[in-house]
Amino acid sequence: MNNNESEKRADTVPASEAASNPFADAPVIFTYTRAQAIEDGVLIDLTEWAKETGFRYPVACTAAVWQGHIVPPEGTREQGQSERGRAHDLLWMLRTTIRMSPEAKSDRLLFKVVLLKAPHHEEIVRFKSCVGPGDRGEPVLTIMLPDED
């Protein structure tokens, strides 16, 4: 290793981190950012709607949540169901759960929403929210199904 490479490592990895993390100076093989996941449709950005509900951080849901629960099921649009309305219900129930739950201090929270699943058939659906670092280390919130990571 030449002197230049040695200086680079010293600048990017603090000695205390290198001692406690054996991968601290390992090369990054692949990264997949939240922005890429949104662009690819793996995550659906709900941030603008979430702001209207009182959220201050970026919010997204997984494609499984969007396709399985936000997009209105067949025959329910005639009963007033829309993506916007169903997303509002999801965000409102999450916000309410966060405000009322002692678990809200955790980075993961389970919550329930009553959704119209077919004409005249409601169902209680469980969701999970996770707070984690965004692409630049900022807090972001992701809504997913309980079995998703």
Image: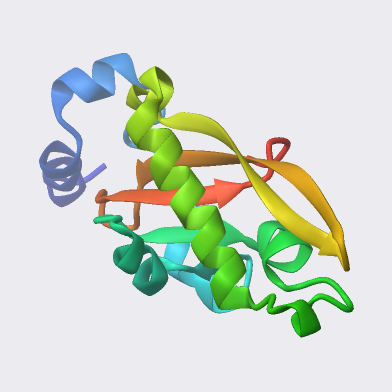
Which residue is painted at 55% across and 55% down in the image? 90
Residue 31 appears in view = no
Q: Position of residue 30 (x, y in %)?
A: 52, 56
Q: Is residue 36 left or right of residue 62?
A: left
Image quadrant of residue 23? Answer: top left
Residue 61 appears in view = yes
Q: Is residue 118 left or right of residue 125?
A: right
Say which of 50 and 43 sits in front: 50
Q: Position of residue 135 (x, y in %)?
A: 34, 58
Where is 52 relative to 108, above or below? below
Q: Position of residue 66 (x, y in %)?
A: 67, 65
How many marks on residues? 0
Which residue is painted at 53% across and 77% down in the image? 39
Color encoding of the figure: rainbow
Where is 112 relative to 19, above or below? below
Q: Quadrant of the N terminus?
A: top left
Q: Is residue 97 left or right of residue 64?
A: left
Q: Is residue 93 left or right of residue 100?
A: right
